[in-house]
């Protein structure tokens, strides 16, 4: 049997987005690979814009196999430049395929608003160092709900932190959740599925003591602990 001529390394696209609005530079974010990311004044936006002249939805980034599709919002025109696009103007609601390279984006608004999106290729197992720009799953955009970020005030044992980190490990790398979240975590931890559920619900109940709107589902709990309160980190995956 002959060996293949070369070994194929699995790679995936990665996008890093930085935003400059009204003279304020937002920290760079990574665009998620399994969900859309909105930019705007809406409470549910992954990156929320503060100026009142900013639209509720400036733009939306949707992942596809070879990059991201940018959907321009309904307020204003979008100007884009890249290595393959010298300069182009896109109307409201236009969809733009962002392929590898560095894209410079600018919107016609009452104040300065621009973004850079750098799309590269990385190994499939690449651990993302930047925070993902994730839409807020815990806020209803029709009703503004003010809640306390109680994560730092909740005492979790090292054992509980480890179990929760394994349970929500997919949140660290923006991966889809396993079909049976608790069963998958129990297998990795070497404990029973009911034990994993007890740990998760005990943490949820502690958090809900200080929240105006209670966390209900495991999906909400994982998102909150990893991305909102930042109670859990990849370091907790090691017992």
Image (cartoon, helix red, strand yellow):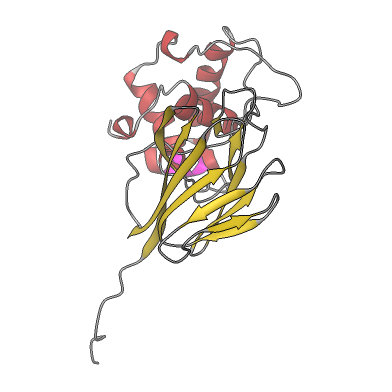
**Residue 201 in the image: x percent, y percent?**
55, 22
**Residue 25 in the image: x percent, y percent?**
41, 30
Q: Along the horizontal axis of the image, is 88 left or right of 52? A: left
Q: Along the horizontal axis of the image, is 137 left or right of 161? A: right
**Residue 160 in the image: x percent, y percent?**
39, 22
Q: Which residues are magenta?
A: 183-187
Residue 163, placed above or below residue 3: above
Q: Along the horizontal axis of the image, is 237 left or right of 43? A: left
**Residue 130 magenta:** no
Q: Along the horizontal axis of the image, is 238 left or right of 211? A: left
The residue lying at 59 percent from left, 29 percent from top is 220
**Residue 164 in the image: x percent, y percent?**
43, 29
The residue nearer to you, when weighing 222 against 121, is 121
Name the quarter where the C terminus is drawn.
Answer: top left
Q: Residue 82 falls in which quadrant of the image?
A: bottom left
Residue 113, placed above or below residue 121: above
Q: Residue 129 falls in which quadrant of the image?
A: top left
The residue lying at 60 percent from left, 12 percent from top is 147
Q: Residue 221 falls in which quadrant of the image?
A: top right
The residue lying at 40 percent from left, 60 percent from top is 12
- Please indicate, yes or no, whether residue 233 appears anywhere in the rendered image: yes
Q: Residue furthest bottom?
A: 1
């Amino acid at each position: 049997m002959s060996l293949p001529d070369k070994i194929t390394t699995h790679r995936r696209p990665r996008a890093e987005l930085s935003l400059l609005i009204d003279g304020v530079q937002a920290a760079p974010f990574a665009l998620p690979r399994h969900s859309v990311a909105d930019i705007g004044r809406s409470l549910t936006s992954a990156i929320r814009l503060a100026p009142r002249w900013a639209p509720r939805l400036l733009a939306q980034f949707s992942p596809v196999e070879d990059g991201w599709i940018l959907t321009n919002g309904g307020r204003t025109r979008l100007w884009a430049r890249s290595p393959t696009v010298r300069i182009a103007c896109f109307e409201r609601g236009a969809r733009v395929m962002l392929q590898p390279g560095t894209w410079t984006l600018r919107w016609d608004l009452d104040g300065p608003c621009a973004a850079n999106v750098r799309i590269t290729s990385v190994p499939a197992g690449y651990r993302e160092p930047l925070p993902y720009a994730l839409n807020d799953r815990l806020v209803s955009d029709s009703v503004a709900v003010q809640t306390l970020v109680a994560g730092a005030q909740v005492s979790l044992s090292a054992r509980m932190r480890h179990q929760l980190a394994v349970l929500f490990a997919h949140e660290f790398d923006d991966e889809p959740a396993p079909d049976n979240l608790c069963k998958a975590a129990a297998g990795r931890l070497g404990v029973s599925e009911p034990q994993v559920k007890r740990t998760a619900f005990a943490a949820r109940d502690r958090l809900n003591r200080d929240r105006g709107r209670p966390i209900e589902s495991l999906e909400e709990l994982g998102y909150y602990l990893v991305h909102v309160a930042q109670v859990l980190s990849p370091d907790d995956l090691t017992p």
